[in-house]
Image (cartoon, rainbow, N blue to C red):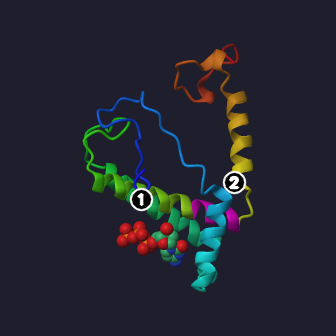
Amino acid sequence: MMASGVGDCGSKNGSSEEHFAFSKHPNLEDIRKLQAEFSQERNWDQYHQPRNLLLALMGEVGEVAELFQWREEVREGLPGWSEKEREHLAHELSDVLIYLVRLADKCQVDLPAATKEKIALNKQKYPVSKVWGSNKKYTEYTEDEM
Ligand SMILES: Nc1ccn([C@H]2C[C@H](O)[C@@H](COP(=O)(O)OP(=O)(O)OP(=O)(O)O)O2)c(=O)n1
């Protein structure tokens, strides 16, 4: 794992067979605390209201999109991307996560717990037996199919 956080995401030839997993730390609560400290030390809490954080988050999502725009389809593992491009992506995705965690903090949403709950709800909404291999939205299924 490089210092930038750019790991062996798949392989450079696009194979998804190589193992990829996140580091265990920092977890979301660690990130929440790190960002809270960062903001407090700079007297920036005054700017980190939910609305500003949402706009900052959207701006960073736009910066991620810039890295993908006007390219051919990008395959898993980002084959053909340079180390510099991978590092840039890692930093922009981190900005997105940092603002998302900060937004959840300021809205008092327990993000890991809420995510666990939402995945459980998604499983109910999209039962494997009904949706296997299909990318239809749940509203497109007929009563019979569900
Ligand atoms: N008021 C602010 C400004 C910055 N940051 C933190 C959160 C982000 O992780 C990062 C964003 O910094 P920049 O706005 O400088 O954006 P970039 O790092 O993406 O720089 P650039 O826009 O030049 O790519 O810094 C923050 O918490 N609160």
Hey, what amino acid is under mark 1?
Ala
**Residue range highlighted in magenta:** 99-106
User: How far across and down, in percent of the image, does residue 112 sit?
Assistant: 70, 50
Q: CA distance from mark 2 to mark 1?
A: 26 Å
Disc nearest the viewer among 2 and 1: 1
Q: Earlier in the sequence, mark 2 or mark 1?
A: 1
Classified by dominant secondary structure, the portion drawn in magenta counts as helix
Task: Check disc 1 and report its element: helix, strand or loop.
Answer: loop
| Residue 125 drawn above or below residue 104 | above
Residue at the spot of label 1: 3
Report x, y in % for residue 82.
26, 50
Q: Residue 146 placed where, x, y %?
A: 69, 18
Disc ID at residue 20: none
Q: Residue at x 25, y 39 (%)?
A: 72
Q: Secondary structure at mark 2?
A: helix
Side (left or right) of 117 relative to 130: right
Q: Is residue 88 left or right of residue 71?
A: right
Label 2 sits on residue: 111
Left or right of 133: which side holds 7? left
Binning the other alpha carbons within 10 Å of mark 2 as few (below 14), some (14 to 19) or many (20 upward) gives some
Relative image position of residue 31 (x, y in whole percent)? 61, 62
Residue 58 covered by magenta stretch: no
How many marks on residues?
2
Give the residue type at disc 2. Answer: Leu
